[in-house]
Image: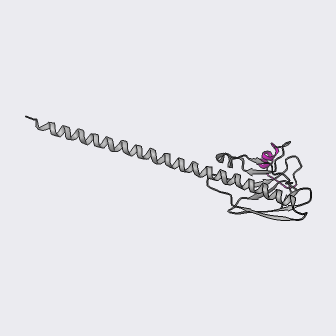
Amino acid sequence: MQKRGSTKDSKKKADLNLGLTFIISLIIIAFITVAAFYTLRNFSCRSEQAQVLSIITSMKEDVERTFYASQGSQIAFRFEMPQVCNKIERICFANPNKRYTTQIDNKLKFFIDKYKGKDMDLFFYPPESYRKLGINEAYDIPFLNATINPNCYTVEKEVKLLFENEGKYVIVK
């Protein structure tokens, strides 16, 4: 014969096991949700990295096409800079080996100056903006010459540049 209290004890144990299972399930669901969010964010950042590298490649191609066109030729270059992971505020065309022809803040000057002696023309600013994307902060754009040094453009939804053939090189207007 069973005691009266034993059914209550087994019911309490079952309730406790059910509650514990529910709590563990919630923790696992929360962990999976966080991992999924992180993974999707990482895919988004990788997509932006590919977009920025594609913009740089297209820019190099358009500058080269402008260089090989007749003197005075111009090519309009437009692009949309992705803005989810990337926090690039300005893109600057500069020659760190020449004196500056425009007033710039000290942080930007210091940033460009660290490339003295190197052939870099394109800079992403601020320096922290590209690190999440895994892209470089400065690039060499062959045939490009910064006559306005530095020549910076604010990154908005769409950035519009004009490349012009000056004979020996291409400038950004």
| 114 drawn magenta | yes
Instruction: Tell me which residue sits at (70%, 63%) in the image.
Output: 158
As rendered, which of 49 and 147 lies closer to the eye? Answer: 49
Q: Position of residue 39 (x, y in %)?
A: 53, 47
Can you name the residue that lies furthest to the left here? 1
Image quadrant holding the C terminus, namely bottom right
Q: Quadrant of residue 152?
A: bottom right
| 94 drawn magenta | no
Q: With respect to residue 118, does 105 lie above or below?
A: below
Q: Position of residue 154 (x, y in %)?
A: 74, 59
The range drawn in magenta is 101-115
Is 5 left, or right, of 38 in this rendering? Answer: left
Is 32 left, or right, of 161 in this rendering? Answer: left
Q: Position of residue 171 (x, y in %)?
A: 86, 58
As rendered, which of 120 and 73 lies closer to the eye? Answer: 73
Residue 120 in view: yes
Q: Position of residue 59 (x, y in %)?
A: 77, 56
Display colour scheme: one colour
Residue 86 in view: no
Q: How many marks?
A: 0
Q: Quadrant of residue 16?
A: top left
Instruction: Tell me which residue sits at (78%, 51%) in the image.
Output: 122
Image quadrant holding the N terminus, namely top left
Is 31 left, or right, of 14 in this rendering? Answer: right
